[in-house]
Image (cartoon, grey):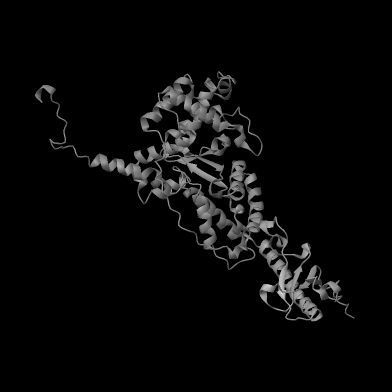
């Protein structure tokens, strides 16, 4: 039997009644459910109701707290449609039960969205990808770069609210707002084009993870346009005379040993001082390293791992034999790359290498390579320092030059000496051998070679007499 209404309610001193304790009604969902009188401003005698669910069942954002989760929890409010407190209480229970169902449905939707969010598929994809990268020669740096793309504060993908959305709900507007985030990081020398391209690639990989499992009908998102607003200068390289000066200087610094055939014992007996990098054996090692990159178009990360066993010879009708190299590569997720040389002098180079370094690491073999992290050996750093020493020896500013420029020099000078390699019938094969693309060769080398050749071919030597500088004496004025 319903309880008697409290005297305070009857007298008007009390403005609200607890449906469970004051009215004694049953079936009230967990939480605080009350009915209350409308404020005078609403000019209504119908009773209102409000309910504050227990925190564990509250699936609203921040559990219903205001001020971004820092304020008090807000009641859910409704109308009972009745003036009688007991009828209003029963109506409030019905309303409250429905509100609770809606909160449960909202929770289920959130759980589904969380399980199928962009963030969740990143975690699934990254778990596999990280394991794969751990076994790569530059895995430590690539793992660090990938995680930075996702977890960086402010600009990382995982720092964006839409990364928590269900993946099929990520839309163009989300990506457009993200491009604006990246644009705010632009500088006079960085238009963020490369960053946007990298983030686009990563998002696509995560989408493909979802497409391969739970969302087969999902499509890759449409992205805002990526515009390059800063013209980048051509990549640095050495001209032919500079390259020859570098090699000549190295031979002289090595006492002529760099180009000689010497035994393994003689190589290890070369003058060496661990406290001073400018020593004979290091000059020989640098010569070997530069020519390895030069002949085979290898990358600046390869000296960490290349061994002489990776090189093998095959018969060649003209030179008798040709050398090839096979090595693991991280570039474009290839497992093994194979490349050969275009210059016949590579044959005598490999003959020398096989004589003095018949096995083991080819570049600076005395430097220890930590297991699973060869980059920590600092081989490339050592080579870069020595290369800068040589450039200073020949009177060049070493700023901006490193082993990477040797690969650029190799591509550029080979294309200059053999223009036919830039033709449609040859460029693809040349690019594949260097493990790059025809478009990259054209972007970084061919277009500049073509401009130089065009200006040289069509140079105008005849001038108007009014273009010339005529020297006169001040006395004539």
Q: Nearer the viewer, residue 393 or 253?
A: 393
Q: Nearer the viewer, residue 34 or 400?
A: 34
Of all residues shown, which one is farthest toward the left? 476
Whether residue 237 is visible, yes or no, is: yes
Whether residue 362 is visible, yes or no, is: no
Q: Quadrant of the C terminus?
A: top left
Residue 122 picture location, percent across and down: 63, 55
Residue 323 picture location, percent across and down: 49, 38
Query: Left or right of 72: which side holds 257?
Result: left
Q: Quadrant of the N terminus?
A: bottom right
Quadrant of the image occupied by residue 77: bottom right
Query: Left or right of 64: which side holds 399?
Result: left
Q: Nearer the viewer, residue 137 or 196?
A: 196
Residue 413 picture location, percent across and down: 38, 37
Quadrant of the image occupied by residue 44: bottom right
Give the residue displayed 73% in from the left and 79% down from the top.
46
Decide: is 182 above or below 387: below
Query: Left or right of 323: which side holds 121?
Result: right
Of all residues shown, which one is farthest toward the right? 1
Of all residues shown, which one is farthest toward the front? 11
Residue 305 picture location, percent across and down: 58, 37
The image shows a total of numbered marks equal to 0
């Amino acid at each position: 039997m319903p309880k008697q209404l409290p005297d305070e309610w009857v007298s008007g001193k009390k403005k609200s009644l607890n449906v469970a304790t004051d009215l004694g009604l049953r079936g009230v969902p967990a939480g605080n459910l009350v009915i209350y009188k409308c404020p005078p401003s609403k000019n209504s005698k119908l009773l209102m109701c409000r309910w504050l669910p227990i925190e564990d069942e509250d699936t609203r954002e921040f559990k219903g707290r205001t001020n971004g989760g820092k304020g008090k929890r807000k009641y859910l409010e409704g109308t009972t449609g009745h003036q009688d407190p007991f009828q209003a209480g029963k109506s409030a229970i019905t309303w409250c039960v429905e509100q609770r169902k809606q909160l449960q449905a909202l929770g289920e939707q959130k759980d589904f969205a969380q399980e199928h969010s962009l963030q969740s598929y990143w975690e699934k994809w990254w778990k596999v990808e990280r394991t794969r990268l751990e076994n790569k020669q530059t895995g430590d740096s690539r793992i660090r770069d990938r995680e930075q793309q996702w977890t960086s504060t402010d600009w990382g993908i995982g720092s964006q609210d839409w990364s928590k959305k269900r993946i099929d709900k990520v839309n163009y507007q989300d990506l457009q707002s993200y491009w604006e985030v990246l644009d705010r990081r632009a500088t006079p020398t960085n238009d963020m084009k490369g960053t946007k391209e990298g983030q686009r690639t990563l998002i696509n990989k995560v989408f493909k993870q979802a497409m391969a499992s739970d969302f087969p009908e999902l499509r890759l998102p449409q992205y805002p346009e990526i515009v390059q607003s800063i013209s980048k200068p051509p990549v640095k390289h050495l001209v032919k005379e500079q390259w020859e000066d570098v090699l000549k200087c190295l031979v002289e610094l090595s006492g002529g040993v760099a180009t000689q055939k010497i035994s393994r014992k003689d190589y290890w007996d070369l003058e060496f001082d661990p406290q001073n990098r400018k020593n004979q054996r290091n000059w020989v090692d640098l010569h070997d390293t530069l020519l390895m990159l030069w002949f085979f178009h290898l990358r600046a990360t390869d000296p960490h791992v290349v061994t002489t066993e990776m090189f093998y010879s095959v018969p060649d009708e003209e030179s008798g034999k040709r050398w090839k190299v096979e090595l693991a590569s991280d570039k474009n997720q290839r497992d093994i790359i194979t490349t050969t040389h275009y210059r016949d002098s590579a044959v005598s180079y490999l003959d020398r290498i096989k004589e003095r370094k018949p096995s083991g690491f080819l570049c600076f073999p005395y430097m220890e390579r930590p297991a699973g992290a060869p980059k920590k050996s600092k081989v490339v750093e050592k080579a870069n320092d020595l290369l800068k020493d040589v450039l200073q020896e020949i009177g060049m500013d070493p700023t901006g030059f490193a082993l990477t420029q040797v690969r650029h020099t190799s591509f550029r000078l080979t294309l200059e000496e053999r223009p036919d390699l830039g033709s449609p019938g040859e460029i693809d094969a040349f690019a594949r051998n260097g493990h790059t693309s025809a478009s990259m060769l054209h972007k970084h080398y061919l277009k500049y070679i073509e401009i130089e050749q065009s200006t040289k071919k069509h140079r105008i030597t005849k001038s108007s007499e009014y273009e010339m500088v005529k020297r006169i004496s001040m006395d004539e004025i």
